[in-house]
Image (cartoon, helix red, strand yellow):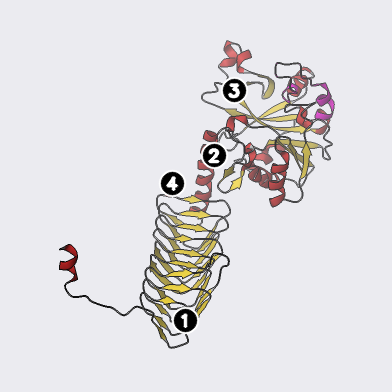
């Protein structure tokens, strides 16, 4: 497609009240700018991004995900404003789609509608029940006649419900002709892109509106907007999973990041949190459990369990207050109150309540290896590095410091001592 896309991300975003650049605030696990680029790449590989405020920080994030984006630094000193952002950019293709880096909810399918309209400029328009605070778009005979700011609107114009959504499709020759004409003779001393609309109307150029959904073209300018966009994104993510067979109890209480994968007839109970690159396959995740960068296959997790990064569970069952970190569990049961870290545990092994793998000595971390058909009694501490072979038992309350060979019982306890008359003596 003969299209260039330009994404404007140079602003300071002062209304976010944050030291972090606006486009780097996250929604469902990814920075806002990520979603805009992701949708843009479904249209063309010719993507340009204009940066200025904290440009190096934003650039580093972009390059973490994409390696084929043309990044341009705005000459903000000489050409501030949205029109200034387009100065000195050489576009390769005949049409330029202008996007904003703070619109993480846009969808490529909706953007493609711009290319179905034949006009010098196609301009996105939203119809609002309450347009107060927005510039109005005056439309006559299906053509845009002007954009007027609310403070400059007359009585009839204030009744208009059509507002500018901020996304445009320009023919290349329009930008080439009119960009040099815009100036900064205004109170803000900035170069405004919307001035091109005024020039084109005067020259009888064709400017057509494209009515778009407010939800998808919502800009994020504050933490309040960020929270609303997060909710919309979450609803889309969860709807997609449910339509593909995932069961969710009280989905409004569930949080799923955009990079998560869920397959087969998995079940998520209320309060579940799925983060990072987690993958859930045909599994049951119970109330208030957290999975972060873990893979769960044919397993049951929770309630109130936590699976931390680099963990793999298959055909296993972990219960309430069990924490798994950087471990592989194959057909393992850990019912409650255990910490399993840096471990490999094989099938038909049972981990009792209160068992802890002690994998860190203050400097280094070590592995715990547990074989098949092993029974680890409650309240045992396994001091890594350690290997517990197949068909073994570890007695409750044991502090294990040596390997356990196949067929053995390991037990490490003080001999019980009962002192007669102690209660009466203690309490006098």
Q: Quadrant of residue 48?
A: top right
State if disc 2 and disc 3 touch (CB < 8 Å). Answer: no
Q: Which residues are magenta?
A: 175-195
State if disc 1 and disc 4 touch (CB < 8 Å). Answer: no
Query: What residue lies at 37% left-to-right and 69% top-to-bottom?
Result: 353
Mark 2, residue position: 229
Q: Which numbered disc flags the more N-terminal residue, 3 or 2?
A: 3
Task: Identify the main secondary structure in magenta.
Answer: loop
Question: Residue 23: x, y in percent?
Answer: 64, 39
Question: Residue 199: x, y in percent?
Answer: 77, 20
- Observer able to see residue 120: no
Query: What residue lies at 55% left-to-right and 23% top-to-bottom?
Result: 131
Question: What is the residue that sits farthest to the bottom in this orientation?
Answer: 407
Q: Which numbered disc flags the more N-terminal residue, 1 or 3?
A: 3
Is 310 in front, or is 142? 310
Secondary structure found at label 2 = helix
Mark 1, residue position: 372
Q: Which numbered disc flags the more N-terminal residue, 2 or 4?
A: 2
State if disc 3 and disc 4 touch (CB < 8 Å). Answer: no
- Observer able to see residue 340: yes
């Amino acid at each position: 497609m003969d299209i260039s896309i330009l994404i404007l991300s140079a602003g300071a975003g002062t209304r976010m009240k944050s030291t972090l650049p606006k486009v780097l605030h996250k929604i469902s696990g990814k920075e806002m700018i990520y979603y805009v680029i992701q949708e843009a790449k479904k249209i063309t590989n010719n993507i340009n991004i204009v940066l200025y405020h904290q440009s190096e920080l934003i650039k580093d994030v972009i390059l973490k995900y994409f390696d084929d984006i043309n990044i341009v630094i705005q000459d903000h000193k000489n050409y501030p404003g949205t029109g200034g952002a387009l100065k000195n950019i050489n576009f390769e293709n005949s049409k330029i789609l202008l996007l904003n880096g703070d619109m993480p909810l846009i969808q490529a399918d909706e953007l493609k509608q711009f290319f179905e309209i034949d006009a010098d400029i196609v301009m996105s328009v939203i119809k609002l029940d309450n347009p107060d605070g927005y510039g109005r778009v005056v439309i006559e005979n299906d053509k845009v006649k002007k954009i007027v700011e609310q403070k400059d609107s007359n009585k009839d114009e204030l009744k208009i419900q059509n507002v500018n959504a901020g996304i445009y499709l320009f023919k290349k020759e329009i930008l080439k002709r009119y960009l040099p004409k815009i100036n900064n003779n205004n109170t803000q001393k900035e170069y405004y892109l919307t001035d091109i609309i005024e020039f084109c109307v005067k020259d009888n150029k064709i400017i057509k509106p494209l009515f778009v959904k407010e939800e998808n073209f919502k800009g994020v300018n504050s933490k309040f907007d960020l929270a609303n966009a997060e909710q919309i994104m979450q609803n889309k993510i969860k709807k997609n999973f449910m339509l593909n067979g995932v069961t969710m109890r009280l989905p409004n209480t569930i949080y799923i990041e955009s990079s998560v994968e869920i397959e087969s007839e998995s079940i998520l109970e209320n309060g579940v949190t799925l983060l990072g690159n987690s993958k859930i396959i045909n599994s049951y995740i119970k109330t208030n459990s957290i999975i972060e960068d873990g893979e769960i296959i044919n397993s049951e997790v929770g309630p109130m369990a936590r699976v931390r990064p680099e963990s793999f569970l298959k055909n296993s069952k972990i219960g309430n207050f069990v924490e798994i970190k950087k471990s592989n569990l194959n057909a393992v049961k850990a019912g409650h109150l255990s910490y399993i870290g840096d471990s490999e545990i094989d099938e038909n092994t049972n981990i009792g309540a209160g068992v802890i793998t002690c994998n860190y000595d203050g400097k280094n971390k070590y592995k715990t290896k547990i074989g098949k058909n092993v029974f680890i009694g409650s309240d045992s501490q396994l001091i890594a590095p350690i290997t517990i072979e197949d068909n073994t038992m570890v007695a409750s309350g044991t502090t294990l410091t040596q390997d356990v060979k196949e067929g053995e019982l390991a037990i490490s306890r003080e001999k019980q001592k009962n002192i007669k008359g102690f209660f009466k003596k203690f309490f006098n």
